[in-house]
Image (spheres, grey):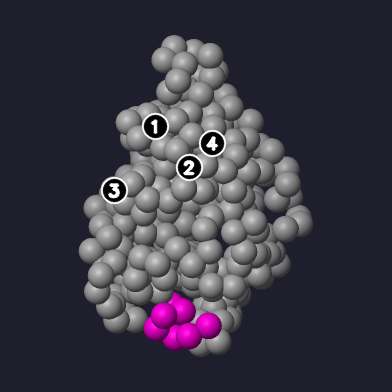
Amino acid sequence: MSLPFDAWQQRVEQALKQSIPAATTDPARLHQAIHYVLFNGGKRVRPILVYATGKLFGRAAEDLDAAAAAVELIHTYSLVHDDLPAMDDDELRRGEPTCHRAFDEATAILVGDALQTLAFQVVMDADLTAKVRLEWVRELASASGSRGMVGGQMMDLQAEESSLSIDELRTMHLQKTGALIRASIMMGAAPALPDPSAQDALVLFAESIGLAFQVQDDILDIEGSSDTTGKPQGSDLEQNKTTFVSLFGVEGAKRELQKLHQQAVESLDMFGERAESLQELANFIVQRDH
């Protein structure tokens, strides 16, 4: 990635560090584990989407630090819980032992709980109007709950030993992966109060790249290496999960990826050159190797 993405990554790293207690703060084991999962090389795609959308509307990055940190806190909590033995039972995350492996299962559960609640505290402590902060809370809560990310995870667990149709698979991932991506974009736009046509374009963009993100994940599960992706290769196959690759084949999944990419880019036409950062992010999502 190019453009201001490195600077935005640094901004959210600093915002995250300011939002959590030091690793030595009691209870130290909990805070050590929180630092372990937050600062282990994440791509920060969701926070960057917050900043890039804000830039589209001319908003200063400092107005968006809280929203960027909050979506990353929610995302990280979801990864910690997804990796648990009762869920996906993964041993590696970003090339390192998962939280329950590095610490223990009970600590990992509490880490997720702490990160989830902290996200809402960070949003409410932001130095912005009450209207914007409440909109952020609404977006974050909606994306994270039973009709968003958590609901999608439930659908995923139930589908492990059964086949899904393509429509069911899309619905699941629009919730599990896409809902928080959509929230990131809409939270970035919220301070600018965009008109309905702009909001509709952003929702289409969000849904397109949310699905594209998952299609690329499914392709990497087959073609990527554990050294690059940071997680076991072929784990979805081992768990008998329905994926875009299992339904379409690798080449078919790649065609679906390109279709979603084109749809995402075209949804931004109304914004012209102002959408350069979001277009670059769409390119990164379909081209990434981890």
Q: Residue at x 54, y 36 (%)?
A: 38
Q: Residue at x 53, y 14 (%)?
A: 24
Left or right: 172 as drawn, with respect to 231: left
Label 1's element? loop
Which amino acid does the dot numbered 1 rest on?
Answer: Asp
Pointer 2 residue: 98
State which tag comes first along the sequence, 3 or 2. 3
State which tag comes first along the sequence, 1 or 2. 2
| Alpha carbons under labels 4 and 1: distance apart | 17 Å
Label 4's element? helix
Pointer 4 residue: 38
The quarter of the displayed image where residue 119 is located: top left
State which tag comes first along the sequence, 3 or 4. 4
Within 10 Å of the Cα at label 1, are there few (<14), some (14-19), or many (20+) other Cα atoms?
Answer: few
Which amino acid does the dot numbered 2 rest on?
Answer: Thr
Q: Please indicate, yes or no, whether residue 14 appears anywhere in the rendered image.
A: yes
Left or right: 26 as drawn, with respect to 288: left
Question: Which quadrant is the C terminus positioned in?
Answer: bottom right
User: What residue span does the magenta drawing correspond to?
Assistant: 244-250
| Alpha carbons under labels 3 and 2: distance apart | 14 Å
Instruction: Single out the mark in the foreground, 4 or 1.
Output: 1
Label 3's element? loop
State which tag comes first along the sequence, 3 or 1. 3
- Residue 107 is situated, as x and y percent measured from the top left of the image, at 37, 29
Which disc is residue 86 wearing?
3
Pointer 1 residue: 104
Q: Main secondary structure of the magenta part?
A: helix
Within 10 Å of the Cα at label 4, are there few (<14), some (14-19), or many (20+) other Cα atoms?
Answer: many
State which tag comes first along the sequence, 4 or 2. 4
